[in-house]
Amino acid sequence: MVFVNQACSQGRTLSFAQGKWLLYKIGEACDYLSLFLSMFFLFPDPISASNIELRNSFRGGANGFAFEAGKRTVSIPLGIRVSDWAVNCSRTRAIAWGQDLSKARIGAPPVNKIYVIDLKKRKPINHFTRTRGPYEAAFSRNHRTAIVDHDIVDLTTGKVVDVIYDMNLDLETCPAFPGKQSD
């Protein structure tokens, strides 16, 4: 802000790392520019999906997964009819599952797709398929893995890394929020 004010009052060129801003002494225009630059560089975007408090109201739909980010609705197309989902406590990852909407083969059982979704980047990380379920999902306290029925899923890659049957993992706990699901 000091640099902008100096450049406005003296009518000098203000240099930044990526290029130059040429500022002239034109009264109120410098005040507006100063205000704009301070809002742009000093304050985070309150309506972006990176703001955790504003990520809420998670829901499944006919063709994907959606959530509210401030006043906007973020839709993530998945190609499945989402039947259920789970969102971690930090609201950075979601696991959504449902029946595949692509053309089913005659005589074959329906296939369910399970998607691991990055809510910050607003896109799926990976998916895997199962012929039954899943019925529930839970996230580990260390935010590295999730359990989807009996599958252990790596949240970084979205891949199934192991299968468990009788094992106690340290699961995360937090108060319910709109659309958390699958507890």
Image: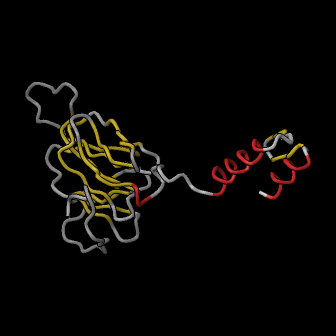
Give percent across and percent down for residue 2. 81, 58
Residue at horizontal 16 percent and vertical 27 percent from the top: 104
Residue 155 in percent (x, y) is at 39, 56
Q: Nearer the viewer, residue 149 or 25?
A: 25
- Quarter occupied by residue 27: top right
Q: Which residue lies furthest to the front in this view?
A: 27
**Image quadrant occupied by the C terminus:** bottom left
Total number of numbered discs in the rendering: 0
Q: Which residue is drawn at 21% across and 42% down?
A: 82
Does residue 50 appear left or right of residue 39 in this picture? left
Q: Residue at x 25, y 55 (%)?
A: 179
Q: Quadrant of residue 137?
A: bottom left
Q: Is residue 107 above or below residue 99?
A: above
Asked whether 30 or 102 is in front, the reply is 30
Q: In this view, does 121 lie above or below 3?
A: above
Q: Nearer the viewer, residue 123 or 105?
A: 123
Identify the image's colour scheme: rainbow, by chain, secondary structure or one colour. secondary structure
Residue 166 in percent (x, y) is at 19, 71
Q: In which quarter of the image is residue 174?
A: bottom left
Q: Is residue 126 above or below residue 44?
A: above
Q: Indicate the quadrant containing the N terminus: top left, top right, bottom left or bottom right.
A: bottom right
Taking depth in this image into account, of 170 and 129 the one nearest to the observer is 170
Q: In this view, does 49 lie to the left or right of 94?
A: right
Q: What is the residue that sits farthest to the left in this orientation?
A: 107
Who's the residue at 74% across and 48% down the image? 31
Q: In x, y percent, where is residue 72? A: 39, 43
